[in-house]
Image (cartoon, helix red, strand yellow):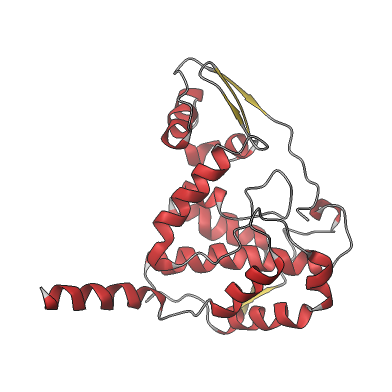
């Protein structure tokens, strides 16, 4: 029994040995509220703290030796922290969409490569066959899933992603769900191939997490996306 416990502890600890999210966690706790709103004005005044966190991400990025959970956690957190960086560097702004080339600017340094937010989302995360990433990455906008004020960690990633999916799908400001009709985020439309393609597939996916169970023949409508800054 003792050997099993020791092996389990080593396995759990091994997930987090490649990256220390302490500084990022402190940043989130200080500048992001429990409902995901960001104090961009204060964060901009203390941009050195954000830049220090960025240095940590730049100096220790995933290699082939990292476990899948470690890679997923890193790039989810990276997407979110670099989105903060993009907004802070262009603040004040009413929307990230007002920032020129926000998603395609190659301002993120990964070793010898410079990549964009779009590359992290579409070139890495979406290729990892984990649709729940869409509830974890935050595009600095009101209609986005809220920015968690704690880091995603490899050892707790599955639980955190389930929570993010449940919170987003049952958030009445993002989706409206009844038994015979769902009015849902454009995220389910934009990335339908990640959730499957037909309406019934979307309903099946929604029903995994929704507090209200939706009928298979329910109407599916998509809500207009609100790109106002999440502050």
Q: Is residue 180 left or right of residue 229?
A: left
Q: Is residue 146 left or right of residue 12?
A: right
Could you tell me if residue 196 is visible in this image? no
Q: Which quarter of the figure is the C terminus placed in?
A: bottom right
* Most foreground residue, 169 or 130: 169
Count of numbered tags: 0
Q: Which quarter of the figure is the N terminus placed in?
A: bottom left
Q: Is residue 221 left or right of residue 62?
A: right
Q: Residue furthest right?
A: 92
Q: Residue furthest left?
A: 1
Q: Position of residue 177 (x, y in %)?
A: 57, 26
User: Which residue shows up at 72% across the image and 72% down it?
Assistant: 107
Could you tell me if residue 193 is visible in this image? yes
Q: Position of residue 17 (x, y in %)?
A: 40, 81
User: Which residue shows up at 66% across the image and 61% down it?
Assistant: 117
* Most foreground residue, 35 or 144: 35
Dividing the picture into quadrants, the one containing residue 121 is bottom right
User: Which residue shows up at 32% across the image and 72% down it?
Assistant: 12
Q: Position of residue 138 (x, y in %)?
A: 65, 55
């Amino acid at each position: 029994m003792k050997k099993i416990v020791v092996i389990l502890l080593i396995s759990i600890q091994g997930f987090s040995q490649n990256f220390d999210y302490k500084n990022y966690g402190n940043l989130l706790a200080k500048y992001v509220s429990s409902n995901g709103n960001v104090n961009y004005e204060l964060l901009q005044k203390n941009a050195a703290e954000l830049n220090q966190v960025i240095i940590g991400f730049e100096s220790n990025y995933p290699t082939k030796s990292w476990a899948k959970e470690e890679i997923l956690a890193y790039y989810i957190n990276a997407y979110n922290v670099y989105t903060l960086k993009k907004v802070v560097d262009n603040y004040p702004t009413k929307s990230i969409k007002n920032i020129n080339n926000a998603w395609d600017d190659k301002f993120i340094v990964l070793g010898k490569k410079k990549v964009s937010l779009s590359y992290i989302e579409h070139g890495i995360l979406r290729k990892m066959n984990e649709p729940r990433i869409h509830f974890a990455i935050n595009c600095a906008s009101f209609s986005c899933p809220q920015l968690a004020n704690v880091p995603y960690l490899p050892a707790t990633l599955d639980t955190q992603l389930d929570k993010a999916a449940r919170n987003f799908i049952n958030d009445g400001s993002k989706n409206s769900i009844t038994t015979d009709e769902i009015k849902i985020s454009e995220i389910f439309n934009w990335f339908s191939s990640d959730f499957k393609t037909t309406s019934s597939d979307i309903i099946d996916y929604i029903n995994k997490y929704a507090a209200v169970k939706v009928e298979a023949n329910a109407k599916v409508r998509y809500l207009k996306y609100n790109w106002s800054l999440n502050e």
